[in-house]
Amino acid sequence: MIERYYAAACQTDLPCPRSRDEIAGRVGFLLGMIDRAVVGYEPFFDVRLVVFPEFAHAAPVYETVDELRDKLAVPIPNEHTDRYAAKAKERGIYIQTGTFLEVDRKWPGAVFNTTCLIGPDGLLSRYRKVNPWLPWEVHASPHDLPGYDEPLFPVVETEIGRLGAAICYDWLFPEAIRALALAGAEVLIRVSAYMDPWGATPPLDWWTLFNRARAVENMAYVVAANQGARAENYPPFSWPGGSMIVDYDGRILSQADPGPFEKIVVGPIDLAALRAERQRRRGHHLLSHLRAEAYTDLYARPIHRPATRS
C-alpha cells in the first residue's frame, strides 16, 4: 500500500475530433503529458495518479446517436486503452482516462460516455456517465437501459487507495458521489468538461463549489480534471479549466489558474491522514452520521424514469 503520493490533474486545449481515426494521435499527445507529469516531478515526489478531462478523446459533436456510433464511438477495451496500460506499467502509475464514446455489443444501439481506470496490471474499471447533460448530450445513461446489470458506480481497491470516478454533470447530483463514498471510495475522481459561465470564477464558480462540497460531505480527496479548451476548439462553449486537488476537509491543495489552455496541476494525497481522520472524528463525520432510514421515502417515486427515453 502506498499511503502518500501525488496526483496530477491534466487539462487540455485541443480541437474536437470528427472521426475515430483522430483518436490515436490524441492518445499519443496525452501519453506525452503523462511523461511530463511523472518525469518532471520525480526529483520532488512520486506522481502515482494521472487524471484527464471529459471529451479528451471524443465529444458528442454530432446531433444523433447514429452519427456518433458511425463516426466516433469505439469498443472498450481497445488499442488506445492498451497503450495507456503499457504506459501505466512503464511508469508504475494509475490513469483515469479522458472519456471515450463507447459502443458495447451487449447494449446494441447505445453509445456511452465512458472513462476508464487503468493501472500497471491493465484495465481495472470503466465508468459510464449516469447523468448526461440534457439536452445537449445524446449518448445513453446506463440507468435508462432496461435490464442493465453492471455496477453504476464502481469503486476499485488499488495500492494507492480505493478509487471511484464520475463524469462532469454527475457531480451536481450529491447522490451519485455519495454512492461512490458509500462503496468505500477514498479518492473521488472528476473527469469533466465544465463550461463557462458555471466554471471556476465568481459570481457562479460552480466548479469549485461542487468539488469542495463533495469532498467535505464524503470525507474524501477529490482530484478534478477539467477541459481548458478555447471556444474555437469546442464551440459553442469555452472551457475554463481550473483543474484542482481538494482534501477531505474541502481545502484546495492546488488549482490551475482559471482560464483556457493546457495545464498540469499536482497535489498531495495522504491516505494515512484521511484514514486516521475517518477513524478518530466524532464531529462533522457526515458518512458515519448518515441516518439513511430517514430518507427511505425520498425517492420512492421515480423522477427520471428508466427506459422512457429513446
Image: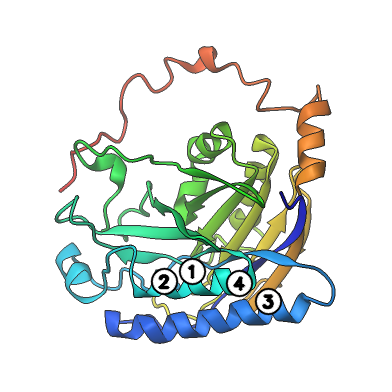
Q: Name which of mark 3 and mark 1 comes first in the sequence.
A: 3
* Residue positioned 35% across, 75% down in the render: 79
Q: Which residue is mark 3?
A: 37
Q: Are marks 2 and 1 in contact (CB under 8 Å)?
A: yes
Q: Which residue is at the front of the view, 19 or 87? A: 87
Q: Which residue is mark 1?
A: 85
Q: Residues within 10 Å of mark 1 (few under 14, many from 20)?
A: many
Q: Are marks 3 and 2 in contact (CB under 8 Å)?
A: no
* Residue positioned 46% across, 43% down in the render: 154
SS for dot 1? helix
Q: Position of residue 20 (x, y in %)?
A: 28, 79
Query: Is residue 255 in sight in this rendering?
Result: no
Q: Name which of mark 1 and mark 4 comes first in the sequence.
A: 4
Q: Residue furthest top?
A: 293
Quarter of the rendering containing residue 39? bottom right
The amino acid at mark 1 is Ala
Q: CA distance from mark 4 to mark 2?
A: 20 Å
Q: Name which of mark 3 and mark 2 comes first in the sequence.
A: 3
Q: Name which of mark 4 and mark 2 comes first in the sequence.
A: 4
Mark in front: 1 vs 4: 1
Mark drawn on residue 10: 4
